[in-house]
Image (spheres, rainbow, N blue to C red):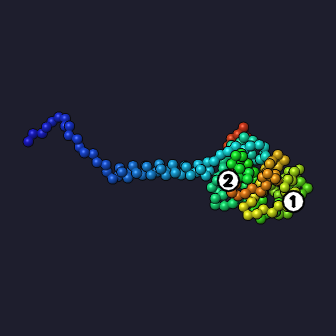
Amino acid sequence: MAKIIGLSFYKKKKTISSAVLREIFSWVFGILTAIFIAAVLDYYLGMTTNVVGVSMEPTLYNGQQIFIDRFLYILSSPHRGDVVVFLPNGNENAHYYVKRVIAVPGDSVVVQNGALYVNGLESEWVTEKLTDPGIASNEITLNSGEFFCIGDNPGNSEDSRSANIGPVQEKDIVGKVWFCAVCEQRGMGFVK
């Protein structure tokens, strides 16, 4: 029999090997996993807002962009010293308030002679003399799920001392401030 020399237009049927299929599926799975993780991280750690006003100076400044950890308070409750973001009285139309937690459920709070006392001890977080004690002129004992929040610049802060805000409900706390972005050469970093 003679061999045919030249071009052959016979199409060989292509098959995909199982190794190639595994490689394709591993890439697709990896990409979908990365997208899922990015979406979860964005939802819980990627929320950002801007500080409004001077109530948190010198820790945070007006207009500074902050990142909020919304996941932390699903697992635990705020602690004294945490800088939190909340909606006053759950008002969805208000801007986010950024304040420091001074007292937690069960604590008693009072302002006497310009000093803030928590459980009878002068607060380590408020060192400035308070000229307006607000509702804290009489001792307040926080109920379950209530937090007393005040700005680091209490002379220029609308906070839990104000009758229209009062103790902040845990359900109204959006999350903990964990990072602040660059704003006007004031630097950036983790919030303490």
Q: Residue at x 89, y 50 (%)?
A: 131
Q: From the viewer's perspective, tell me whether residue 3 is left or right of residue 150.
A: left
Locate the N terminus and report the quarter of the image it occupies.
top left
Could you say which disc has been placed on residue 138 in the image?
Answer: 1
Q: Is residue 119 visible?
A: yes
Q: Secondary structure at mark 1?
A: loop
For the point 70% across and 54% down, which residue is it? 172
Query: Which label's residue is closer to the chain start, 2 or 1?
Result: 1
Q: Which mark is residue 175?
A: 2
Q: Nearer the viewer, residue 191 or 64?
A: 64
What residue is shown at x 70% (from left), y 58% (from top)? 170
Picture coordinates of residue 126, whole percent (x, y): 82, 53
Going by the numbered disc 2, the residue's amino acid type is Gly
Q: CA distance from mark 2 to mark 1?
A: 29 Å
Counting from the top left corner in percent of width and height, residue 181 is at 67, 43
Q: Is residue 6 left or right of residue 147?
A: left
Task: Rate crowding at label 1 as few (under 14), some (14 to 19) or many (20 or more) other CA atoms within 10 Å.
Answer: few
